[in-house]
Amino acid sequence: MKRLDCYLDFISPYAYLAFEHLPRALEGLSYEVVYRPILFAGLLKHHGQLGPAEIAPKRDWTYRQVLWLAQAHGIPLQLPAAHPFNPLGLLRLAWAGARQGTPNRFVCEAIFHHVWRSGAAADDPERLAELTARLAPGADAAGAAARQALRQATDEALARGVFGVPSFVFDERLFWGFDALPMLRAQLTGDAALDAAWRAGTRIASGARRRTAD
């Protein structure tokens, strides 16, 4: 069975869309998905980037696009009351609920639905407490083990070249974004055209670079 690693943060609407669409996108293939929640903000800090919601025109575009993509793909979506929000409680809850080393799809689905199907505040303490009670994690979401697991997963993602969410890694090739799912399927099926594009894409020389302030 083919195994692929899925790096996600519940704060990302694109991660939600990819999570929901993944079974359909890879239908007919034999594969195992290992879900690895990570802190998207940690990636942004490492790479010196702003998040999409920190750039006003990009923020507006993001919400319009994800609503359109959800409708086009038949995925229920209701934007949370506020976005971005602090996802740490949800990420740590996911790792606290890991039964065999990583969170399973049921845990991740419950948290994604908490954020992207309610229209309420995703980080509301009362809602988070209700979700925690429903998932009944085997460890304390506020404890050291859950915190360390999240840090380790984020560090691992950076070491593997992950720069955004959702990201999928298979055979040490990284596929980023909801729109990369067709490429991921091509990788899993051994598509020769993808191999050719992959090799060609690594041979592009670096051209002009943006000057940074002194």
Image (cartoon, rainbow, N blue to C red):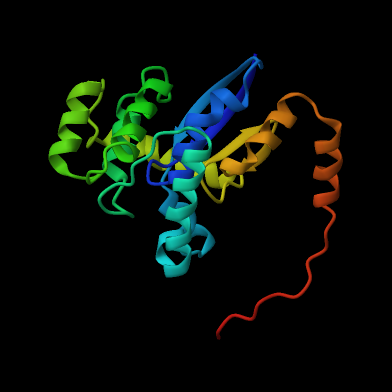
The answer to whether residue 164 is above or below residue 58 is: above
Q: Position of residue 131 (x, y in %)?
A: 21, 29
Q: Is residue 41 left or right of residue 18?
A: left
Q: Quadrant of residue 174?
A: top right
Q: Residue at x 17, y 24 (%)?
A: 133
Q: Residue at x 45, y 54 (%)?
A: 64
Q: Position of residue 182 (x, y in %)?
A: 68, 35
The answer to whether residue 129 is visible is yes
Q: Quadrant of residue 209?
A: bottom right
Q: Is residue 43 left or right of residue 194?
A: left
Quarter of the figure with the N terminus: top right
Q: Quadrant of residue 125?
A: top left
The total number of labels drawn is 0
Quarter of the figure with the C terminus: bottom right
Q: Is residue 128 left or right of residue 103?
A: left
Q: Position of residue 211 (x, y in %)?
A: 64, 81
The answer to whether residue 51 is visible is no
Q: Is residue 176 left or right of residue 45?
A: right
Give the camera-side residue of 176 and 40: 176
Q: Residue at x 57, y 24 (%)?
A: 24
Q: Residue at x 18, y 44 (%)?
A: 124
Residue sticking out furthest to the bottom = 214
Q: Position of residue 14 (x, y in %)?
A: 48, 44
The answer to whether residue 209 is above or below residue 20 is: below
